[in-house]
Amino acid sequence: MFPHLFRQAVMLVRRDHTLGTLLERLAGLRGDLVLAEEADGGPHLTVREAADLVAAWAGGIAAMAAPGDVVVIAAPNGYEQLLLCLAASRAGVVPAPVNDQMRPDEIAHVEADSGAVHTIRSAADLPAAEPLAHAVPVEADAVAALFYTSGTTGEPKGVELTHRGLVGGLVAGVALPSGVRHDEAVVSLPVAHIMGFVTLLGLACAGVPVYFIPKFHPVRVLDAIETRRASVYVGVPAMYRMLLDAGAADHDLRCIRMWISGADAMPADLAARFKKLGATAELPLIGPVGEASFAEGYGMVETGGGVAAKLSPPMLGFGLGSSMGVALPGYRFRVEGDDRAPVRIGGVGELLVKGPGVLKGYHGDAAATAATFTDDGWLRTGDLARLGPFGTVFFVGRQKDVIKHGGYSVYCVEVEHVLEQHPDVVEAAVVGLPDERKGEVPAAVVRLAEGRTLDEAGLVAWAAERLSDYKVPVRIIALDALPKTGTNKVQRKELIARFTEA
């Protein structure tokens, strides 16, 4: 039995894949395995049941659209939205998933920009048709899906990601043994965003069942982990902060063997606290021992998900902090200064990436596509990195999140991490305020622990003991909640307005 499964896995890994064929092939390998269960009475599916749904829905989509057409998938956040995307791909159609939290005008922009022929809001929208027994053939390097960026710097752009970029690096997970022990991942991410999309695909390939909560709520997530004895949790740093605020330390989370984070920089001390809440293993007559591992990925929409990863094993302190980890197979990094020359060790510059998941281009925007690539084909990420020894890179922040203070560069992420080490501060965000003499000066907005009041002078003094003078915030205000985007990233422009109001 096992040699047969191994041969199937090797064949699956070696072949080119598309979104539309992935579940069909996984069903041939481990069809009876539970794929996903959704909270609130959502679907409970095995791999084979999900593959059958994809084939059935693909027939309906094929009756609505021709191969190469774009359809917007505006279904509510949930596993159905993922399966509708896979069904569209099976029909040779390009899905453009959108977050159901988007405003109608934002969805209308995606519909117009993508040239979508239909918007699908539910599988119930599909006409009755025969299941599509065979996927429409497409090349692995063809556009598989359009993911629209959040639009924090302008109208959202459609990122063209290929089948090879979205699926090619994930199918290696089928070689992992599944069903040997109880594993389940609790996930509550937006499927229409790249991290949620590839997380669900990656867990499917690895044979790890998912308990999906469509709308994140920290208490619901903690209860689900505790009662279901889940072994994996996947979230973003903002979610981990909310879990801690909601009493994570008071729940029995020792069933967790692996915490996973992405989409934003994870503070080292926050990751270390969650490691201690999990466990390495559970021994007979003894119970849980050790602590959990913590894994982080670095990536963005334009890279089709993760391009680097790092792991902090149980009982060891490395693998946390600003290091991006190691480049995933097929990816290469380069760090360039303002003069476009490679920086020396210790230098800071823009991170450039090359690899199979990098976008094909921005849909219908040749100028934006040309601007995001170098002449020799490297993707400009817009992220700043510090070059370390042996080709290692350390995340510094977004280019737009650098404050030019009197000729000095202040990296917002560095200041935020220092402020968040203060016992009164749960979360911090740093912005640059206009200054006639110095150009910009750093200021901070903090969210305080329950029952604490802002001691601005004391917090400034705390920062001054740990940062160079030019990095210390000149003003600090407190808010009950920091304004966030749909992917739980801080909206810095709104914070600048709060200072004006203050």
Image (cartoon, rainbow, N blue to C red):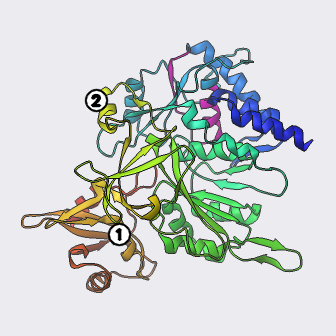
Question: At 54% from the left edge and 65% from the top edge, which residue is drawn?
Answer: 240
Q: Which residues are magenta?
A: 67-87
Three-letter amino acid code of the residue under disc 1: Glu
Residue 455: in magenta span: no
Looking at the image, residue 192 sits to the left or right of residue 408; the answer is right
Question: At 61% from the left edge and 41% from the top edge, which residue is drawn?
Answer: 169
Q: Is residue 369 visible?
A: yes
Q: What residue sits right under mark 2 in the picture?
A: 367
Looking at the image, residue 262 sits to the left or right of residue 169; the answer is left
Question: Label 2 neighbourhood size at 10 Å, few (<14), some (14-19), many (20+)?
Answer: few
Question: Can you give x and y, in whole percent of width and height, for residue 359 in the image?
Answer: 45, 35
* Above/below status of 144 relative to 232: above
Image mark count: 2
Question: Label 1 neighbourhood size at 10 Å, few (<14), some (14-19), many (20+)?
Answer: some
Looking at the image, residue 186 sits to the left or right of residue 236; the answer is right
Q: What residue sits right under mark 1 in the picture?
A: 414
**Can you tell which quarter of the image residue 36 is in?**
top right
* Above/below status of 16 relative to 310: above
Three-letter amino acid code of the residue under disc 2: Ala
Question: Can you give x and y, in whole percent of width and height, for residue 12 in the image?
Answer: 73, 34
Question: Can you give x and y, in whole percent of width and height, for residue 319 in the image?
Answer: 55, 68
Q: Nearer the viewer, residue 493 or 15?
A: 15
Q: Nearer the viewer, residue 470 or 347?
A: 347
